[in-house]
Amino acid sequence: MNLGRKKRRMVLALLMGVCVVAVGAIYADLEIGYYTSVNLGRLAQPAPPRLRPNGVYRVAAYPLYAPQLVPGVGRQDAAAYCNTCHTPSYITMQPPLPAAIWKVEVDKMGKAFGAQIPTDSQARIIKYLDAHYTPQTRKR
Amino acid sequence: MPAHSSNYTRRALLKTLGIGGGALALSHFASASAFAQQEPIAGKRLSPFTGPGGNPYWNSVGPMATYPQKAPLVLLTDRPVQLETPRHYFLDPITPNDAFFVRWHLEGIPNEVDLTSWRLHVEGNVNKPLELTFSDLLHKFKPVTFAAVNQCSGNSRSRFEPRVAGGQWGNGAMGCARWTGVHFRELLDMAGVKSGSVQVQMQGLERGKGPKGMPSYEFMKSLDLSNPVLDECIVAYAMNGEPLPMLNGFPVRLIVPGYFATYWVKCLTDVRLLDKRDENFWMNPAYRVPDTPRGTTTPAEVAAGKVKMIPIARMPVRSFIISPDGATKIPAGLPVIVRGTSLSGFGGIAKVEFSDAARGGWREAKLGEDLGRYAFRIWECAWTPEKPGKYSLAVRATDEKGNVQPDEGVWNPGGYLWNKIERQEVVVGDAA
């Protein structure tokens, strides 16, 4: 009985010891010279421009990095009409906004800014924003 | 031992060196660590949006992106272009041109300007309309240079609670440059403002895809002719002694010291004297703030239609903690120099105070060089955290008019005029 207990204790101690050494070994390995591939991306350097001494001052085309809108019913309408005047990142940059505010925003585009959006498309855009970009619905 | 400990030691050492040497380059490096990997899991990135609560980060959360004539900046939108200046650039009172924030309203931003055909027009209710070349501006007027902060009206909009729609700027929609140009008044006088003129309207090359006559087609801003700020305005053709980057308004932009950037019209081409008030969308209802102390109100009051709105004007006093930025743990007992910047549209900064909350109370920080009443005023304060733990560092500024930053936010429907006391949490670790 006593002997069994002692044995069990020894095995337990041994196991713990192995664990400590293993964890130690892992951390010893990580503590120094820890490199890994990242998925944050990197930015390419632009090539220098070729300039001529005339009166035209020019810069390169402005790059587009527009994000994708979440798939769903009404996305086509949003992509087509909102994108006329501005990038869809005007939508994705917003915090999750209540449905009432999205409606005000879509109405503003028509009334204040003169965007010509058919009524049924307008309704689909509002529904789409409610389905994906409110505090209750926004996932990404 | 956490996996990133060796990284940490290296940073702490650099930080110490930065303090000891006072070397700007080193402190820049240490502070830039906010954009370096902090987590043992490499590649962990920020969510692309914040909310429904306020944005807890100093900058907005977009990715870094490269644009013509620009260092990598934080991208808000790509069409039209809106870019935010990363935090560490504000250790210096002058913001480099290639790091200066960018904000356009309409997608038609010039990619090129031909100075052989470009003209600055001063017209409308004047005796003698003017057409000036870039060379005229360089040679026919006395050049004026001063430093002034250019801050977006919506800077820090992402702090608002409840959140409001609009560009979700963090704190980096601001910058301070040395602007060189000609007195705006001289141009007006040369053209001869006719009596009965009430406002002067500015328009640049920016155009949108919307129908003519709509705010989605053109952007125009006006100032009252009776506004004394006109005496301080210049039409700037140089920024920090260099041509303006295209995205910051090449070839010239209006400088309105003390005022929010909405009036600093970029790629300026047309100055019009008006005999009646400008009621175009960009003057009304856009860029308006409640006519209340601090321009604050509530969603309920706005919904009830009770709030009188007036055009946004001068920038309230603000201050910022730039370093430490919370990305690096500080060993207990290590003397640290807390650094930051400050500004006010109502005149110079009189005082900046710092608090670490633990000791309570505010103590006065040391102000950096005075580059003029409308420039950034950097500050620093020696700080030695004695015990491990979390500290909430806070900073508040007082301007020459006696305006002090309050500890309450503001709320208005446009997301303007944020100037609440800024805080930075830092973690102090065991040193023995």
Image (cartoon, coloured by chain):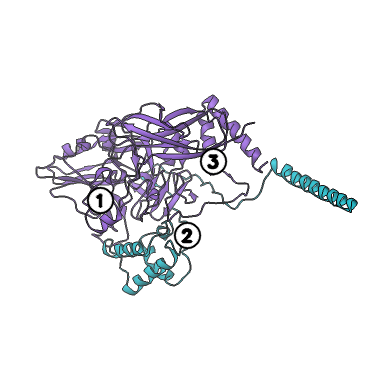
Mark 3: which amino acid? Answer: Ala
Q: Amino acid at mark 2?
A: Pro
Taking the view exactly as shown, the residue that stands out farthest to the left is B195
For chain B, what colour was chosen?
Answer: purple
Chain designation of label 2: A
Mark 1 crowdedness (10 Å alpha carbons): few <14, some 14-19, many ≥20? many
Badges 2 and 1: C-beta atoms under 8 Å apart?
no
Circle nearer the viewer, 3 or 2 = 3
Residue type marked 1: Met
| Marked residue chain, label 3 | B
Disc 1 is placed on an element classified as: strand
**Which SS class for mark 2?**
loop
Can the viewer see residue A14?
Answer: yes
Q: Is residue B227 above or below residue A107?
A: above
Q: Position of residue B414 (x, y in %)?
A: 31, 52
Secondary structure category for the residue under label 3: loop
- Chain letter of disc 1 in the image: B
Q: Which residue is mark 1?
A: B220
In the rendered image, which quarter is residue A123 located in? bottom left
All told, the count of numbered labels is 3
**Residue underneath mark 2:** A67
Residue under circle 3?
Answer: B327
